[in-house]
Amino acid sequence: MKLLFIGDLQFGRKGKICDLELPNNILKLFNSSDVLFFNLETVVLNTNFDIDKHKLNHKDINIYTHSEDNLKYLKDTITKPIFVSTINNHTFDYSIEGYYNTLQVLDKYNYKFTIEKTYYIDDDFIYVNATDHWTIKESNVNNYIENTKLWDDNCLLIDSYEKEIYTYNLINYLNKIKQNRTLVFSIHWGKNFQSQHNNSTTYLQSRYELFFKNLCNMGVDVVFGHGAHHIINKPYEIYNNKLIIYGLGDYMGDFKYLNEYNTDKNMMVLFDTNDHSVENILLGGNYTPYKNNSVMNCKQSFILS
């Protein structure tokens, strides 16, 4: 089975909209895989959703879009199953109500995802979705403790050694029931903009590398890491025939171009579970204005030849 992992998708910010456009060669690649995986870096809200009532006003950055068009476009265009990671630092930007609204939209278009602290299971996959305290702290510096409780109560938040032990126990249990399924552990981890061109490895990266390898030793087949908003110095590796992805950058989003991090670039990784081979595809980005706001730009990706 061929699994395709792509960078983060952010469809809008505070009501601004950027329409996803898939070039033919990327669309062909998407449909040549058996399953697609990505992290959704946006809360999706209905037009009648009470933004002022549910917004976390003490949070530094709140991201949402009113448009379902991109999610509908993806499902109409891609014939294969799509797994979406919904647990990240923007999951509860508009409280638990905004989170549930997002899940309703994903369910409407038949995406596969986890709900709160549960895992997803079907005939082929077991899928776990988590985040860590760094991603929460990065965007909640004013009220870190207060906001952490919202994440901790409603998703798998790995913010302590005890939570790591809990995660190991969960994976140990899932490994016992997985049979011939592929076990994928998706995690939004670390700080924004983790590594520069010097290929140095930070303490944070080394610590999570050990954590991810421990998960693989316990039965995880793929660790899908995301969150840095750029291709980090070691984007992925094969470890004992398991795939560990550390960070592929943003496939679509409105982070401004930062030369020292090459934020215009991102990567897709195609993993064959039969022979454990990996193919990586490097992408560039075109920055175009939001269609209802000419001040901010949104990156659309294309394959670099």
Image: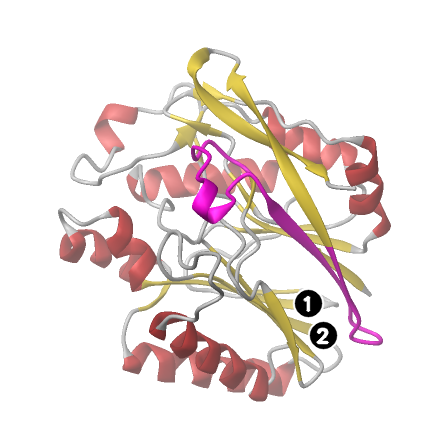
Quick check: 239 above or below 281?
below
**Does residue 273 show up magenta in the picture?**
yes
Please tell me which residue is depicted at 47% across the width and 64% down the height of the picture.
118
Q: Is residue 66 left or right of residue 183?
A: left
Q: Is residue 216 left or right of residue 65?
A: right
**Does residue 183 show up magenta in the picture?**
no
Q: Is residue 34 left or right of residue 71?
A: right
- Residue 285 location, quadrant: top right
Sequence-wise first label, 2 or 1: 1
The answer to whether mark 2 and mark 1 are in CB contact below 8 A is yes
Quick check: 158 above or below 62?
below
The residue labelled by disc 2 is 181
Q: Is residue 300 visible?
A: yes
Residue 19, horizontal then vertical, whole percent: 60, 23
Please tell me which residue is depicted at 79% across the width and 42% down the height of the picture.
305
* Start-end of magenta stretch: 252-280
Which amino acid lies under the numbered mark 2 shown in the image of this protein?
Answer: Arg
The residue labelled by disc 1 is 125
Q: Quadrant of the N terminus?
A: bottom right
Q: Is residue 93 left or right of residue 254?
A: left
The kind of secondary structure element at disc 2 is loop
